[in-house]
Image (spheres, coloured by chain):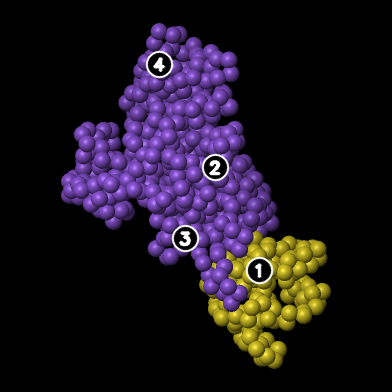
Amino acid sequence: MKEIKIVLGVIGSDCHAVGNKILDNFFTEAGVKVENLGVMVTQDEFIDAAIETGAMAILVSSLYGHGEIDCIGFREKCVERGLGNIILYVGGNLVIGKQSLTNVEKVFLGMGFDRVFTPDADLPSVLKMLEMDTL
Amino acid sequence: MDCISVDLGSTYTKGGLFSFHEGSLKLVSRATVPTTPFDLSAGFNICIQALSKGTQTDYDIPIVFSSSALGGLRIAALGIVPDVTMKMAKLTALSAGGRVSQVFSYKLTEDDLVSLEQEDPDIILFAGGTDGGNEDYIHHNARVLAGSTLKSSIIYCGNRTMKTEVGKILSGREIHFTANILPALNEPAPEEAREKIREIFLEKIVYGKGLDRIIEKTGTRPVPTPLGMYEYAGLISEHSDEWKEFCMIDMGGATTDFYSSCRESSVSEEVVIRGIREPDIKRTVEGDMGMRINALTVLQTANRFLREAILRTGLDFEEFECFVQKVSEKPDFLPSGKVEKEFDRILASACVSVSAERHAGRVESIYTSGGRVKLQTGKNLSGVKKVIGSGGYLSRINAPVWQRNFIDDKGWEILLPQSIEYYRDEKYLFPLLGNIARLYPDESVVLGIDELKKEELSGFGGYSGNPE
C-alpha cells in the first residue's frame, strides 16, 4: 500500500498543543508519515508544508472556537497554489456556543473541507476514512 | 616555523607573515598592495616579497590564501516554496561563501531560464522537496535545466527520492549530488551541499586571471574569503568559552557581510518559533550596502538615517551627497581630513545598522482569547554582547554608530543585541587568520581574539548611539 503523507497542525492563534500531540502519536504509530507543524499555524504554512512534503491530506485542528474565521478561504487558497485536489479534514471545537453538529458540518463542508470531526472523534475510524480517501 | 597568509580582495591584496613557536602564533609583519585584477599573481608576488624580505626565499614557507577577487562565487538558488526550500537554498549558498546571484521558486519558467542563461552562474543549487516529498516541481525544473545552454555546475540537494531521475534527466551535464538540505521541514542539513560548493570552487572556479599560477607556485588552493571567515567564526565559538556568541561585521566596498554565532533560542517560554530553523553560524550578505561601489544605494536606502546623522553632527547634507557621489566612482578612495572621515563613519554606520536589522529575527505579538502569544521568526541576537568589526572599513575607522531600532515598520520587535561590546579587528587580520586556521586552528583563534581592540561605541556629535 502507498505510504500516506499528511500535514498536521492547529490553525490560527490557537495554542492548544495536547490534542495535536495525541494526533501526531496516533497517526505516526499507524504508519502514516506525519509532518506536524504544531500550534498557531497559518493557512499558508499548511500549504507550504503540503507542497514541500508532497502530502495527500491536510488535517486542521481548532480548539478555541474561532475555527470558522480561521478556515475561511482555505480551499480557495489551496486551489490558487496548485493543491486543488488535496484532501482537507478539520476537527475540534470549531465554533463557539451550542450549535448542532450537522450545522457545523454543513458550514465547513461548504467551505470545501472533505470531512468534519467533533473533539470526541474515534481516531481509528478517522484513519480508515483517510485510507479510503487517499486511495 | 613561519607561514604566510594572503587574501586577494577586489581592491587590495592583503598579506601577513606569521610565526608559530612553542604552541603560539604571532603576527610578524603585514603588507597591503593594490590588487592587480588582470593578473592576480602580480600583486600576489609583490605582497609575498614585501612579507618575506630578509627571512627566506619567496616560496619556501607554507603559503595559504583566499580570494574574493573576480566578484566571488555566483550561485543561483532553486527551491520550491519561497519560505521553505528556496530560503534554505539561499542560506546554504551564503554559508558556503557564495554570492546569491538569483533565486527561483516553484516551476522554472522560460523567462526564468532566459535570465539564468544571461547571468550564467558558476553553480546552480538545485533544491526542493523534503525527502519523500514533492516530485512534480523537481521533475519539471530538471527538464527545464536539461533543455538549457547553461554550463554551470549543478548541485542537486533536494528530495532524495528524485535523485536517480534527476540524474537521468540531466545526464551529460556537470551534476553533483548531495544529501537533501531540508530532509524534513524542521531538520536543516546544509553541510554536505556546502562542502560540495567548496570543492567545486577549488576545482574549477579558480582558473583564469593568474590564480592558477599562484596555485602552481604555492602548491595550495584558495578558499572563497567569506567561506574562510564563516569557518573561522565557527572555530572561534568552538574554541573559546567567552566567545560562544558574537556577531561579526565584514564591510567592503560593494557589500556588508553580517555573521552571527548563537543558537537559535526563543525569547522566552511563551514564544512559538515558526519558519525554518536557522544555522548556529549564520551569514547574510547585503548586496546594496557597500562603502564605495554601492555608496549611492546606501544613500537611497538609509536616507532618513543619514539625514538625521548628518544633522546631529552639524555637517552639511548636500556636501555629504557630493562625498557619496565621489566615493562611489572611486572604489579605492581613502578619506582625508576630519569631515571626510566623519562622512565615511556615518556611511559605515548606516551599513551596520541596516545590515544588522535585516540579519536579526523578529517577534510578533498576537493577542488571542488565551492572552498574548509571541511568534518568533529568525535568530534571537538580543543576548549577544560581543560584536567584531572587520573588513577594509571597519578595521580602519573607530567604532561606527550602531543605531538600533528595536521595532520595525510592521511594529514587530527586532531581536538585535541589547547591549554591545564592540571589538575592532584593527589590523584587519580576520581574513588572513581564516586561512591560517587551516594550519593552526586553536592558535589562530587565540591570536585573533588577542589582537582585537575593545572600543566604546560612540555617537554622532554628542549623541550616544547606545540607548543604555
Q: Where is residue B448 in the image (x, y as percent from the top left)?
A: 49, 29
**Residue type at the position of mark 4:** Leu
* Amino acid at circle 3: Glu
| Quadrant of residue B36 within the rendered picture | top left
Q: For mark 3, what is the residue?
A: B413
Front tag of 2 and 4: 2
Q: Are marks 1 and 4 on the same chain?
A: no
| 3D distance between C-alphas at marks 3 and 1 | 25 Å
Q: Position of residue B73 (x, y in %)?
A: 45, 39
Q: Residues within 10 Å of mark 4 (few under 14, many from 20)?
A: many
* Mark 2 vs 4, N-terminal side: 4
Sequence-wise first label, 3 or 4: 4
Give the chain of mark 1: A
SS class, disc 3: strand
State whether residue B468 appears in this view.
yes
Earlier residue among tags 2 and 3:
2
- Which residue shows up at 53% across the image and 55% down it? B378
The chain drawn in yellow is A
What is the C-alpha distance between the residues marked 2 and 3? 21 Å
- Label at residue B51: 4
Labels 3 and 4 touching (C-beta < 8 A): no
Q: In this view, does B95 lie to the left or right of B47?
A: right
Q: How far apart are marks 2 and 1 (CA)?
A: 33 Å
Tell me the element at label 2.
loop
For residue B245, the mark is 2
- Dot label at residue A9: 1
Do the residues at pointers 3 and 1 share their chain? Answer: no
